[in-house]
Amino acid sequence: MSGLRQDVLDWYVRRHGDGWGAGDETAFQAWLAADARHAQAYAQWAAHSQAIADLPADALAQLRRNLQRDKAAAAPAPRRRFLRPALGIAAGLAIACGSGLLAWNHHQAQPVFAQAFSAPRGQQTEVSLPDGSRLRLDSTTRLAVTYYRQRREVQLLDGQAVFSVQGDAARPFHVLAGPVGVTVVGTRFAVRHTPGLPGNEGVRVSVEEGKVRVVRRDGTPGEALRDLPGAVYLRAGEQVAANAQGRLTPVAAVPGEGIALWRDSRISFVDTPLAQALAELERYGSTGLTVRDPAVAALRLSGTFDPTDAQTFRLALPSALPVRLKQGNGTTEVVSAR
């Protein structure tokens, strides 16, 4: 078994076993983000495994007998043994798919489209998907798209995007963003998931048109989202946020500037700590600013800025807050004006 296939199997078995927690999910998401091939390989494996679950009981029993028979025939006589049933079926799936043993049903769960997309720092990316849905990715955003015959799935690994989804009642559209899952049929909405950004580690979902269903998924795969309890339904003009553990806040109104001000190269801060505001601006490009004084870092900033125009922000900052810019040693430090 190749190294990537073994890694995928290990993650899949662990993720569907007892004891899987938030720390495990964080590590898993980091592994997905490390290489675009990881997300694609895992999606394909999950689809193959779902095919096993969809088999009739008699076909599944026959497959198990065939796998055990093949395993026994291939093993040296003195050391003949079998894998534990759950892991054996999962490991045998690679052999079954390769030899055509699952030709009956597994085509229903195989991906029909899989591709990773990203927007580099300081740029936005427009994506058109095979079904006519469109995505707009903000700066420093990475996601993986996988389409199956019975559902469409996007894993938002980092960043934020606006989704304009082509309606298809037979194939719901799922967005997986860390601990949160979003399900729609046809609508336009925005999702933000920036797990590495201080003060913005959670998830935010905002709806511009249509209706979406938001759930705390705790690592549950996309195909099971519709069965999760505690769903929150959002209509146009509504939004909901979640912390890093997926705990949802009460539904609130979308701000007057809309679901994604960044589409117009603007970001808005409302009583935001300066350190958090600078971290947000750094997603679009270097500000050239540092803050060492905790009291200065905690100053609250309000205002709307062009995240791609660092020079104007530097000029405006001393007027917005009681600070000055101190040059020295090749750096520009924001210090108290007092």
Image (cartoon, grey):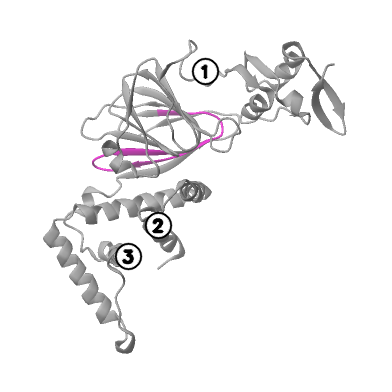
Main SS of the magenta part reads: strand
- Identify the residue at image location x=64%, y=14%: 302
172 up-or-down from 13: above or below: above
Label 3 with label 2: CB-CB less than 8 Å: no
Label drawn at residue 14: 2
Q: Quadrant of the C terminus?
A: top right
Q: Is residue 144 magenta?
A: yes
- Identify the residue at image location x=47%, y=38%: 245
Query: Which residue is nearer to you in this view: 100 or 210?
Result: 210
Q: Quadrant of the N terminus?
A: bottom left
Would you name the residue on which mark 1 appears? 261
Query: Which residue is nearer to you in this view: 333 or 315?
Result: 333
Residue 337 visible to the viewer: yes
Question: Mark 1 is on which residue type?
Answer: Leu
How many other residues sit within 10 Å of disc 1, few (<14), some (14-19) or many (≥20)? some
Question: Mark 3 is on which residue type?
Answer: Leu
Task: Determine the CA span between mark 3 and mark 1.
Answer: 47 Å
Q: Is residue 48 magenta?
A: no
Residue 192 visible to the viewer: no
